Amino acid sequence: MKILILEDESMLALSMREFLEESGYDVDCFSCSEDAYDAVYDKIYDLLLLDVKVLGEKNGFEILKTVREEGITTPAIFITSLTDIDDLTRGYKCGACDYIRKPFDLAELKLRVEQVIKVHCFSSAKEKIDLPYGYTYNVENMKLYIAEESIQLAKTEAKILELLIKRRGNVVSYEMFWEAVWGEWIDPTNIRVQVGTLRKKLRKDFIKNIRGVGYTIDS
């Protein structure tokens, strides 16, 4: 799962980044609103953590309002010291899923991130997602199971699987893989090798190859 943080308090940003990375997330951190805004279009994120008052021409409210108007639906949480009800209302109208008020405990941050990802990224409030051939995916710990036994996956394999599960029932193209998993262009041959290695650990046809297009998992 890939998270964007926009926070110009350097120590807080570093603490958030390190904590979330230790929890298994990929994190890009920005202190300037223009850099964060550009990144939203350059990469595929699963969640945006946006400080309201930041350096740059746009504040957090304005960034989210703009990307929503341009069709980007990535879930977002505002990070703020604001407590006025008008400010909170404005944030929700901009398209935020939640607020977290400063100062906050990192454990609270993790809980809010997990809840938003569970509901919005996997389109399910369940802790486990049932998949074909008896597999289940635990949203809490982001692991795949078969008959209650977890399947050990390398980091890149886990990212590939997460993307396929999030878009289950639809074909994931090579372009979507390199944007969401690697964040840069990757030769399709390398993607096929990585997916092939993952498929060897799973039941045949759990991940289906759509020749010349990409891969899919049935819904």
Image (cartoon, grey):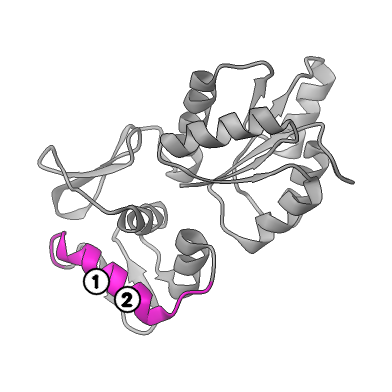
**Residue 181 placement, left or right of 31:** left
Q: Name the residue tied to disc 2.
A: 192
Q: Nearer the viewer, residue 182 or 44?
A: 182
Give residue 196's mark: 1
User: In this view of the protein, can residue 71 be seen by the observer?
Assistant: no
- Amino acid marked by disc 1: Gly
Instruction: Give the answer, above or below, for where 168 lies relative to 24.
Output: below
Asked whether disc 1 touches disc 2, contact meaning CB atoms under 8 Å apart, the reply is yes
Instruction: Give the answer, above or below, for where 115 lies relative to 212.
Output: above
Residue drawn at 56 percent across, 51 percent down: 45
Instruction: Give the answer, above or below, for where 177 lies relative to 127.
Output: below
User: In this view of the protein, can residue 15 be seen by the observer?
Assistant: yes
Residue drawn at 42 percent across, 44 percent down: 122
Q: How far apart are marks 1 and 2 (CA)?
A: 6 Å
Q: Nearer the viewer, residue 152 or 149?
A: 152
Residue 170 image point, x, y percent = 40, 64
Residue drawn at 20 percent across, 54 percent down: 132
Residue lying furthest bottom in this view?
212
Q: Which of 36 and 138 is in front in this view?
A: 36
**Residue 146 placement, left or right of 45:** left
Q: Residues within 10 Å of mark 2 (few under 14, many from 20)?
A: some
Q: In which quarter of the image is residue 102?
A: top right
User: Where's the C terminus, which quadrant?
Assistant: bottom left
Residue lying furthest left in this view?
147
**Residue 45 placement, left or right of 124:** right
Residue lying furthest right in this view?
57
Residue 134 image point, x, y percent = 14, 48
Residue 58 shown in magenta? no
- Amino acid marked by disc 2: Arg
Q: What stretch is highlighted in magenta?
A: 185-204
Secondary element under disc 2, as helix, strand or loop, is helix
